[in-house]
């Protein structure tokens, strides 16, 4: 596939999509890594066990929410990319229009030929009927 020149605004939009992708994936990875770190073996600390458990639980909830947010952002990015492709894929739209136009012109030519053939048959039949009528003894 040949590389087409992309207008400046489209290029900037594609760069922003790339940046969003990298940021969201990094966010998911960082938060997942931190959740795994929270599953550590208990250390001696100045906090009581219950307080440490509550703090760890809260941090896990926040990190899980961050992972979900990043996932939703990636799903929105996929949707945006689909819309971008649909709205800006002019060569394939033009190709589709050309193919449909060719198909319909071919169908039109076939129908025109059938109609002309039908007209000729009807004219012949009508001529024969008129000839029979005017030459008949039962007028």
Image (cartoon, rainbow, N blue to C red):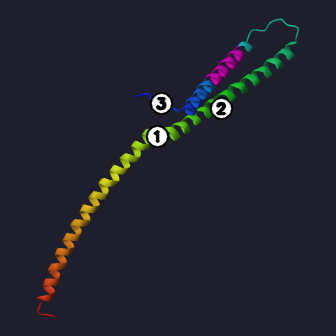
Residue at the image position 44 percent from the left and 43 percent from the top: 93
Residue at the image position 50 percent from the left and 31 percent from the top: 6
Separation (CA) of disc 2 from disc 3: 31 Å
Classify mark 1: helix, strand or loop: helix
Asked if residue 9 is among those painted magenta in the image, a careful observer would answer: no
- Tell how many labels: 3
Please identify the quarter of the rendering in which residue 51 is found: top right
Q: Which residues are magenta?
A: 22-36
User: With respect to residue 63, does 115 lie above or below?
Assistant: below
Asked if residue 31 is among those painted magenta in the image, a careful observer would answer: yes
Where is the C terminus found, in terms of image quarters? bottom left
Where is the N terminus found, in terms of image quarters? top left
Residue at the image position 65 percent from the left and 22 percent from the top: 23
Q: Look at mark 3 in the image and give the residue it sits on.
A: 5
Q: What percent of the width, then of the height, locates residue 33? A: 68, 15
Separation (CA) of disc 1 from disc 2: 29 Å
Secondary structure mostly seen in magenta is helix
Q: What percent of the width, then of the height, locates residue 130? A: 17, 83
Q: Nearer the viewer, residue 7 or 98?
A: 7
Q: Classify mark 2: residues with Cα within 10 Å, few (<14), some (14-19) or many (20+).
A: few
Disc ID at residue 8: none
Residue at the image position 26 percent from the left and 66 percent from the top: 115
Q: What percent of the width, then of the height, locates residue 75? A: 61, 32
Q: Classify mark 1: residues with Cα within 10 Å, few (<14), some (14-19) or many (20+).
A: few
Q: Look at mark 2 in the image and give the residue it sits on.
A: 72
Disc ID at residue 90: 1
Along the polypeptide, which appears first: circle 1 or circle 2?
2
The answer to whether mark 3 and mark 1 are in CB contact below 8 A is no
Q: What percent of the width, then of the height, locates residue 38? A: 74, 14
């Amino acid at each position: 596939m040949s590389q087409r020149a992309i207008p400046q605004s489209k290029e900037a939009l594609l760069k922003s999509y790339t940046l969003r992708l990298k940021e969201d994936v990094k966010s998911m990875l960082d938060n997942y890594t931190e959740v795994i770190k929270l599953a550590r073996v208990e250390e001696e600390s100045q906090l009581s066990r219950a307080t440490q458990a509550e703090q760890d639980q809260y941090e896990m909830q926040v990190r899980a929410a961050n992972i979900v947010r990043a996932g939703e952002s990636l799903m929105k990015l996929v949707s945006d990319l689909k819309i971008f492709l649909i709205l800006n894929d002019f060569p394939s739209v033009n190709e589709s229009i050309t193919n449909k136009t060719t198909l319909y012109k071919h169908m039109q030519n076939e129908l025109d030929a059938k109609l002309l053939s039908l007209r000729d048959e009807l004219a012949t039949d009508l001529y024969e009927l008129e000839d029979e009528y005017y030459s008949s003894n039962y007028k």
